Image: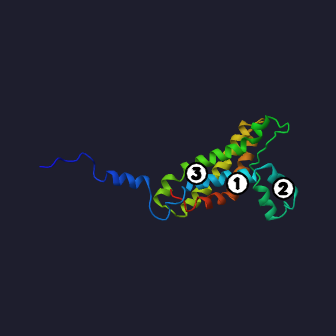
Amino acid sequence: MQPRSTRPAGSGPGRIRGLVSRSGPVSSYGTAAGTGALAVLLLVGICGSPAYTRWAADTLTSPDSAGGYYLRLLAWPAWLVDADGQAGGLFAANLRAVLLVVLAVALLYLLPAAQVARVPGSISQFFSGWAAYVLAGGLAAVLAALLGPDPSMLGALQEASAGAGYGFLTGWIIGTASLGGRA
């Protein structure tokens, strides 16, 4: 009589290797959340920079045209290198941009995990990335308004509208970056 194994069926080195490494066409790409997080950093880092916000406000971007409006909208999470006497200092001036990046990255990792894992490589990655950015934009705006130098409920509601609108109109960029990665 041979001794019985105490391991449950389906476990063992092959099973663990299958959970840790992937094979197939998506094995060479990063995770959907990781590529989305990189896109968030680039979008906020480039379009929120003082150079871009100055360019969008001063040059050929007419607020009366759709293209000009969109280029100005991209500068919404503006961050500063110098507070220039702003109330609350440099931290308050950059709070919205910092919160947007932190919340967007956290939501990109939290929201799509269970949903996208069931349907890898599908359009659900796109919508999960987009939705995470809309939610992050609204939450970052509310928190920045409430934690900023002049907190008010009216200001928080107005900022939430602006932040969610920004996330809705620019979140497709994050959703597109999330496509093709593994869950």
User: Could you say which quadrant of the image residue 65 lies in?
Assistant: bottom right
Q: CA distance from mark 1 to mark 2?
A: 15 Å
Residue 135's spot in the image, x, y percent? 63, 50
Q: Amino acid at mark 1?
A: Leu
Relative placement, left or right, of 54 versus 182 is right
Using residue 126 as the reference point, say whether residue 78 is left or right of it: right
Upstream in sequence: badge 2 or badge 3: 2
> Between tags 2 and 3, which lies in front?
2
Residue 79 versus residue 29: which sits nearer the camera? 29
- Residue situated in front as seen by the camera: 24 or 9: 24
Q: Position of residue 114 (x, y in %)?
A: 48, 53
N-terminal of the pair, mark 1 or mark 2, is 1
Q: The residue tagged with tag 1: helix, strand or loop?
A: helix
x and y, in percent, of residue 55 in the image: 84, 55
Disc 3 residue crowd, few under 14, some 14–19, many 20+, Cα 10 Å:
many
Q: At x 57% / y 53%, what residue is drawn?
A: 33
Question: Which label sits on residue 55?
Answer: 2
Residue 154 placement, left or right of 63? left
For mark 1, what is the residue?
43
Q: Nearer the viewer, mark 3 or mark 1?
A: 1
**How many callouts does the rendering have?**
3
> Residue 68: image x %, image y %?
81, 61
93 above or below 36? Answer: above
Q: Residue at x 51, y 58 (%)?
A: 182
Q: Quadrant of residue 95?
A: top right
Task: Identify residue type, mark 3.
Answer: Leu
Distance of label 3 from label 1 (alpha carbons): 15 Å
Q: According to the image, label 3 marks what residue? A: 108
Sooner in the amino-acid sequence: mark 3 or mark 1: 1
Q: CA distance from mark 2 to mark 3?
A: 30 Å
Residue type at numbered disc 2: Trp
Residue sitting at x 30%, y 54%: 10
